[in-house]
Image (cartoon, helix red, strand yellow):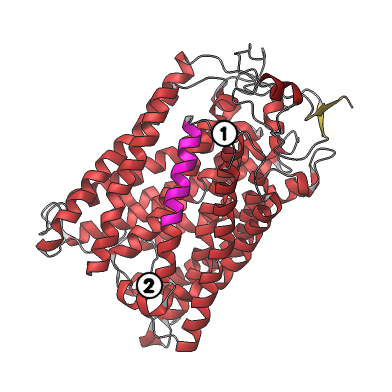
Amino acid sequence: METNVVGVDQSSSGEPSAPPRVHYLNAAYGIGSWLLTKDHKRIALLYLLSVTFFFFIGGFFAVLIRLELITPPGDLMQSETYNKMFTMHGVLMIFFFLIPAIPAVLGNFLVPMMIGARDLAFPRINLLSWYIYSIGGLLGMGAVIFGGVDTGWTFYTPYSSTYSNSNVILAALGAFVAGFSSILTGLNFIVTIHKMRAPGLTWSRLPLFIWAHYATSIIQILGTPVVAIAIVLVALERLFHIGIFDPKLGGDPLLFQHLFWFYSHPAVYIMILPAMGVINELITCFSRKRIFGYHFIAGSSIAIAVLGFLVWGHHMFTSGQSIYGGFVFSVLSMLVAIPSAIKVFNWTATFYKGSISYQAPMLYAFGFIGLFTIGGLTGLFLATTAIDVHLHDTYFVVAHFHYIMVGGTIMGYLGGLHYWWPKMTGKIYPEGWARFAALVIFVGFNLTFLPQFILGYLGMPRRYHYYPEEFQVLNVMSSAGASILGVGYLIPMVYFVWSLRYGKASAQNPWGAHGLEWETSSPPPTENFEKQPIVTHEPYDYTPKPEEVAVV
């Protein structure tokens, strides 16, 4: 087989180059060629369209929630409607955007290319995953269309299993079906990473993006079946009243919470670990420096995946569990801070003496570090049993998990989308607008959720659609921030679409980055590489060449 040794002379001119005459975007035409495609890159774009749709629907519900909370009396909608609004916002955002966004879009597009493979190990299963995800999404939207669901995205029993009159079965079924998509994607990634790496791409040379997706896939495979079983049990309880969760029938509602959080806390890492993988790539590229502590960062991804399964009990400090149980879960929860801190410390160490450029992807990386750090530090408050009793189910919790799951994940997702957009489309977006959008999103996000820390500390509970007047100023600030944030999210969608028609052609490697995905054309051919790449160098070798040092 013809081979191409890489890592010796990277193309980094940044000059536009003519795209290949035939690439994955124009290799076949017609809707059928997309709906039946087995190309991981096309499937990634199908996911991109799908998750974007659910993101803006879920975001629309968030806007309605913040409009409702501008005034204390709750004069925009009834309490039942409000309950449905925040439930559908949570269900759509978590199950159909935050969990699949980075693995399904960026992971699908990049995992084979980053390891020098032509496709994922199971291309047909990859396409099946998208169809399963879409069916789950349609079921979720069906719950919205037929009246919504009011249980909260956690589906806590016995309310969800016995008392709620809304579309619990339909919404839960949507999440249940989407879970199979997540499992299949994780399985596909693990097999691909194990079996299809290019010659020379050892485990210690893997990009950290790949390590992050490997760890994420472990969680997807081991954790998702548990929540699927919990959801099935809710359905059985609701339909046949068999006494699993209802205390009147001999059941235990806390059983559901244990099962739910056994998955749903690791699910936080399904959302944030891939974002961390993206941030690794951005920081090392735009610092022009080898990432500090490569092995520690790779190991910390696995450590987070393992520890994530041991901390679910900190969601239940106020449920009546024993003091000793609470103590154990408190200590384990704080242990997760260690691998998380390792990543942050190594990222900041990478900046040291780096040649930093402030292009849009790097701005998102900075935003990620700031928001994730705030979210992580406030998580320590909630991992402390005594403080959690005061803050439990207040807006402090809302602010905390939005900083982690929304601030962190979306910053990583948008940073990655900007970074690899030229590779995905062969087009360049307007850099000025991209920097402006990153700034608007960062400002809007903080204005939205920083006041909520104070609201929670002062005692405003979450999920209430009316509140005392003394909380209005902070709620107005939060709602104003949400408006800015909404505009910030719309701007990239506009210029990304614009760039498809009017954007300049991209060079093969516009950032001068290292990695196998930059060794092929933009957009790539269907087979990813014209020649089989062989890896001969360590990852992220941004050490200046002698001639470059001499020029400086």
Point out the frontmost of discs 2 and 1. Answer: 1
Rendered position, 470 above or below 76: below
Predominant secondary structure, magenta span:
helix
Q: Residue at x 52, y 60 (%)?
A: 267
- Pick the residue in front: 47 or 66: 66
Rendered image quadrant of residue 375: bottom left
**Label 1 is placed on what type of residue?**
Phe
Secondary-structure class at tag 1: helix
Left or right of 512 in this view: 371:
left
Dot 2, how many residues are within 10 Å of its Cα: few (below 14), some (14-19), or many (20+)?
many
Asked if residue 413 lies in the magenta stretch, the reply is no
Which numbered circle lies on residue 202?
A: none
Question: x, y (%) of residue 385?
Answer: 41, 79
Give the residue number, with chain letter if any, for mark 2. Answer: 161
Cα–Cα gap, marks 2 and 1: 51 Å
Q: Residue at x 63, y 50 (%)?
A: 212
The residue most toward the right is 1
Asked if residue 368 lies in the magenta stretch, the reply is yes
Which numbered circle lies on residue 286?
A: 1
